[in-house]
Image: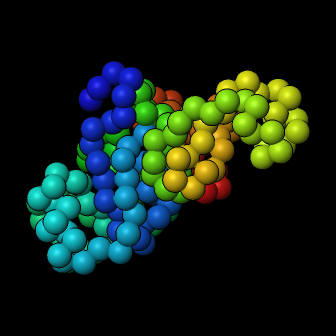
Amino acid sequence: MEGNGPLKRRFVVDSMLGKVAKWLRILGYDTRCEPLDESKLIEYSEAGWLLLTRRQSWCGRRSVVCLHQNAPMDQIRELHGRVHLEMEAGGFLRRCIRCNELLEGIERRDVIGQVPDYTFETVTEFNRCPTCGRIYWEGSHRARITERLKRLLGEEPPETLAEAE
């Protein structure tokens, strides 16, 4: 993995695992989410993508990880146990959770009227998705996400993981 650049491991998540895709993007992984079929499985596998699914018929195939857990956070924990997900590899909160694109910095003056007034007054740095235009900023949610992922990935005791998805 590179120091401060995007993470190299890439995932294709079967559309039934959309929340897993969101959390992988939060971690900084290039993660596509779409319905998968046999031809896409072969195409992505040959291109070096790791495929995530719950389809038991694909278990044991090259580049496929079959998840067995039902809850999204349990699925992330299960995936971490198999491929060791990293939180501090330079990509944390650097991707659009909807589009998967890397976020780009945007001038503060360019978000006037696009973010809540309080946010504009209290935040100095903003990022935008170049595809969908969604604006991101560092708020209190970053600390909550960080703590939740630290517990989930084994950096803190997991007793409090019963939070809502």
Whether residue 27 can be seen here: no
Whether residue 111 can be seen here: yes
User: What residue lies at 79% left-to-right and 43% top-to-bottom?
Assistant: 115
Q: Position of residue 164 (x, y in %)?
A: 65, 55
Residue found at the very far top of the displayed protein: 3
Protein image colouring? rainbow
Q: Position of residue 106 (x, y in %)?
A: 63, 33
Q: Is residue 34 above or below residue 37?
A: above
Name the quadrant containing residue 42: bottom left
Locate the C terminus and report the quarter of the image it occupies: bottom right
Name the quadrant containing residue 56: bottom left
Q: Is residue 139 above or below residue 40?
A: above
Most foreground residue, 73 or 30: 30
User: What residue lies at 74% left-to-right and 39% top-to-bottom?
Assistant: 111
Q: Please give left or right for residue 106 compared with residue 5 in the image.
A: right
Q: Position of residue 109 (x, y in %)?
A: 76, 31
Most foreground residue, 112 or 57: 112
